[in-house]
Amino acid sequence: MRYSVGDKVVHPQYGPGRIAGIQQTELLDGTKRYYVIDVPGRGLTVHMPVGRADEIGVRMAMSEARLPWVLHVLRGRPQHLPDDYRERQRQVGDKLKTGRVIQLARVVRDLTWHSEWAHLTKTDSALLRQGRDLLAAEMALVSGDAVYDTTRLIDATVAAAVAKQLN
């Protein structure tokens, strides 16, 4: 897929950002074109070869119209995670690697619920934080809200769903 300056995109490794420019660089084997992606949530600028965007897994950020669906997923019933921490962390890690917003929402929801009836390991907690940070950054990018406010919305939505089910 071809992107234009100003497009909101998600890099599977670095998270959501905006195409800040398209740069041509002279190399020994010829001229290469790179997307310059500003990733504000991490304070990064990523240079990615134009021809490798699909291979790397860069995608357009979700539309603002998808925000209610993300909140719906966060409020939904959790998927039971394996009791075996290795298997649980493998499954969660696989979902995070997709970089897909609905998978991120499921990770946040399911690990938060899991913490209600079992202890989260250090790695589980780190995966939960990573999922929430990526989800909040993409939601903030498309809504124009601050990442801090979006993180609070995510936490409040999941906490309300847990409280409702436990009462």
Image: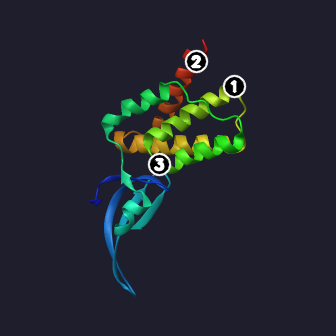
Query: Dividing the image into 4 quarters, which one contains the C terminus?
Result: top right
Residue neighbourhood size for the residue with mark 2, other residues' Cα within 10 Å, grouped as few (<14), some (14–19), many (≥20): few
The residue pinned by badge 1 equals: 117
Residue 107, image x, y percentages: 55, 38
Q: Left or right? Give the position of 40 relative to 133.
A: left
Circle 1 sits in a helix, a strand or a loop, which is it? helix
Which disc, if any, is residue 163?
2
Amino acid type, residue under disc 1 in the picture:
Trp
Query: Dividing the image into 4 quarters, which one contains the N terminus?
Result: bottom left
Q: Left or right? Give the position of 96 relative to 56.
A: right
Which disc, if any, is residue 99?
3
- Please determine whether, in this image, residue 117 is positioned above or below residue 131: above
> Residue at coordinates 71% horizontally, 41% vertically from top-left?
85
C-alpha gap between disc 2 and disc 1: 13 Å
Residue 81, image x, y percentages: 62, 34
Which residue, as the protein is rendered here, is positioned at the far bottom? 28
C-alpha gap between disc 3 and disc 2: 28 Å
Circle 2 sits in a helix, a strand or a loop, which is it? helix
Q: Nearer the viewer, residue 36 or 13?
A: 13
- Please determine whether, in this image, residue 46 is positioned above or below residue 111: below
Which image quarter: residue 71?
top left
> Residue at coordinates 53% horizontally, 30% vertically from top-left?
155
